[in-house]
Amino acid sequence: MIGETLKGHLDLLLLAILAEGPAHGYAVIDSLRSRSSGLFDLPEGTVYPALHRLESQGLLRSRWQNDAPRRRRVYELTLKGQQALAKRQAEWRKFSKAVDATARI
Amino acid sequence: MKEQNIRSYLRKLERALWLRGLSDIDTLAEIESHLREATERGLLNGLDQAAAEKEAIKRFGSVRVVTSTFMKERISLMQKILLAVAVVAGLFFAYVDSRPTWDDTGITVGVILLTSGLLALIGFQRPWLLALAIGLWLPLYEILTTHAYASFVALIIAFIGAYGGWIVRLGIRKTFHTA
């Protein structure tokens, strides 16, 4: 249930994590899990297709980092990605406020 | 989950992605890097190598789940445009071939082969779909109107072109990647 709900908001979460600095896929997934106290625990392999899509949309860019113990693909937010994140955060605030008000939370 | 070590999991994933025209050297390298890192984490947590790899694979998701997620995510705008071009081209070839004044099967075959090959080379990621989009209309029309089943050759030619172009593209990418 959480998994299905999460999929609809995955872009926002991935962009928000990468807004704090470049990171490779494993670190992004780790951050997603730890920040949500384990609630956002998707199959890890399903996050990479979303990262690739965000990159193809120009919201992220990636580069291979060879200086780490292991070769890693590191993602970072583009300017377009920063703008998309700001827009999605505003939409989420509006949506969340409306749900809170309607459901009397 | 049957895939219990990273090497066999990656082999199965590569095959599953390849069959759907989604195989990509960078993606597989990235997934391997992830699984190795997750395995190291498992070893640090006291698991042995086999158990750590098994846990890393379990957390990553089954080949089926990962492949289907890649399929859903890769239907990009570019892919939709290329698919539309393929459908229009396929319909156009069927129309031209159906004209009573047109009697040059060699040209039709050549154009279907070239178009499907070129679109696959440009970047259409699912050759089977590309082949159907280009090569299905002509035999469909012929079979419905004249029951000429031999026109199915057009579909076979489209498959040859699409997979040919796709294999060349993979070869170019591989050469570029290893250079």
Image: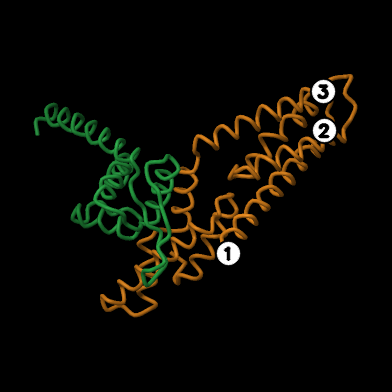
Chain colours: A green, B orange
Instruction: Give the CA separation, mark 2 to mark 3.
Output: 11 Å
Residue A34 in the image, given as x and y percentages of width and height: 21, 57
**Mark 2 or 1, which is nearer the eye?**
1
Q: How many marks?
A: 3
Residue B76 in the image, given as x and y percentages of width and height: 49, 38
Q: Quadrant of residue B61?
A: bottom left
Q: Secondary structure at mark 1?
A: helix
Residue type of the residue flagged with mark 3: Ser
Q: Secondary structure at mark 2?
A: helix
**Mark 1 or 3, which is nearer the eye?**
1
**Sequence-wise, which precedes: disc 2 or disc 3?**
3
Q: Which chain letter goes with mark 2?
A: B
Disc ID at residue B178: 1
Instruction: Give the CA separation, mark 2 to mark 1.
Output: 38 Å
**Sequence-wise, which precedes: disc 2 or disc 1?**
2
Instruction: Look at the image and tell me in which quarter the N terminus of chain B lies.
Output: bottom left
Residue placed at 54% from the left, 65% from the top?
A: B11
Residue that protrudes farthest toward the top in the picture: B100
Q: Which residue is mark 3?
A: B98
Residue placed at 33% from the left, 73% from the top?
A: B40
Pointer 3 local density, CA inside 10 Å: few below 14, some 14–19, many at least 20? some
Q: Which chain letter goes with mark 1?
A: B
Q: Which chain letter goes with mark 3?
A: B
Instruction: Look at the image and tell me in which quarter the C terminus of chain B lies.
Output: bottom right
Residue A55 in the image, given as x and y percentages of width and height: 42, 45
Q: Which residue is mark 2?
A: B108
Q: Specify whether A7 is left or right of A96.
A: right
Residue type of the residue flagged with mark 1: Thr
Q: Secondary structure at mark 3?
A: helix
Residue placed at 49% from the left, 71% from the top?
A: B7
Instruction: Give the CA separation, mark 1 to mark 3.
Output: 47 Å
Question: Mark 2 and 1 residues: CB-CB less than 8 Å, in contact?
Answer: no
